[in-house]
Image: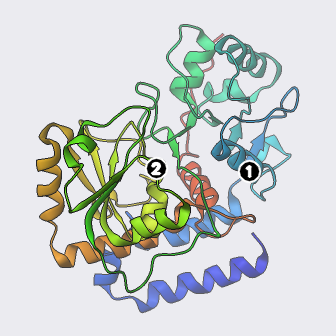
Amino acid sequence: MSITSFLLFTLFVSLTLHSKPLHSLVSSPYLSPTIIYPDYQNMLSKFKVFVYEPNKPFTFNSPAESLFYTSLRTSPFVTQKADEAHLFFVPFPSDLSTRSIARLVRGLRTELPYWNRTLGADHFYVSCAGIGYESDRNLVELKKNSVQISCFAATAGKFIPHKDISLPPVVFSDAPHAPSNKTTTFLGYFRHSGVKESTLAKELIGDPHFVIETEPSDHMTFVERLSRSKFCLFDYGIDVSWIGEALRFGCVPAVIADLPIHDLPFMDVLRWQEIAVFVGSGGGAGEAKRVMGGVSRDRYKRMRELGVTSSQHFVWNPSPQPFDCFNTLMYQLWLRRHTIRYVRRE
């Protein structure tokens, strides 16, 4: 971030905290609205990350992984002085075998002093699919101790809440914003995956209050769908790739899931209960319609406004900006910089 951007952001924070009444802070999308701004500034000035040099150049399989890695390597957070680093980044390609990952960690353990100080608890890595539980000691420490950044929605059994971080689907900064005078036509919009047909989609097809489709004909049609729908339905575990775009266009997410969700993007930052509604899948279309229809006009307006505000955190910029996707991910890492110092095992 440039000095000019930092000064402008500081001014924005100062005006925000000193001009907003208490009720505005209560309706903030953030879990700790009075803490996040000064803590974020503290991160900008102090946070240091040491990036291990990979044995050979490689590419990631997903755009989100690639964007994060590129943004990190060119960011002011990176330090060449490992002794001043708060966290250490372990880079490896998406398709690297578990045996090769174990060998990589073994090399860090035997050749450098940093891993053994915390058994990897001050290290992090990116793996879209996530790493499972293996018997190899190196993989066990990587999985249980290091912070994993994996793509949302996380693969079942490969995400540890409160330690791991979700990598949101990619939304670019050149996308338009939600219209200020949005008039909704439909109660819900459901773009379901054609790979795994949704039972909920079958139940809602033909309902005049919903638009159901596998894929819009073009991007402008997609934008229109989002802008004209009060809620956007997401079948958790099937297709949540457009949740950032839904927020951006003022379509309140209605997430359909059997169990509580622990890997929503930026759970350390955003008050998801005030941004989205959550519906159990067992009740089918009737339950979904009941929950969405039961949201009062005032609550819906507040949720929509908070969602649009929150959408800035899902955006990737050519040059990272305050509170965009990259910097919010870094902020979540900053919150994890206080690691437990384990006793070294021989």
The label on residue 215 is 2
Q: Which mark is residue 41?
A: none
Q: Nearer the viewer, residue 281 or 310?
A: 281
For label 1, count other residues whose C-alpha is less than 10 Å away and answer few (under 14), some (14-19) or many (20+): some
Asked if residue 28 shows in the view, the reply is no
In the drawing, does residue 284 fall left or right of residue 235?
left
Asked where in the image residue 60 lies, by quadrant, the reply is top right
Examine the image and state in which quarter residue 29 appears.
bottom left
Up-down: is 20 above or below 321?
below
Quarter of image, res 81: top right
Disc 2 crowd, CA 10 A, few/some/many (<14, 14-19, 20+):
some
Q: Amino acid at mark 1?
A: Leu
Query: Is 298 placed left or right of 82 in the picture?
Result: left
Mark 1 or 2: the one toward you: 2
x, y percent for residue 180: 42, 85
In this rendered view, identify the residue nearer to me: 283 or 102.
283
Residue at figure coordinates x 46%, y 84% from the top left: 17
Q: Determine which of the numbered discs, if any, sits on residue 72 in the image.
A: 1
Numbered disc 2: secondary structure: loop
Residue 258 placement (x, y as % from top left)? 23, 36
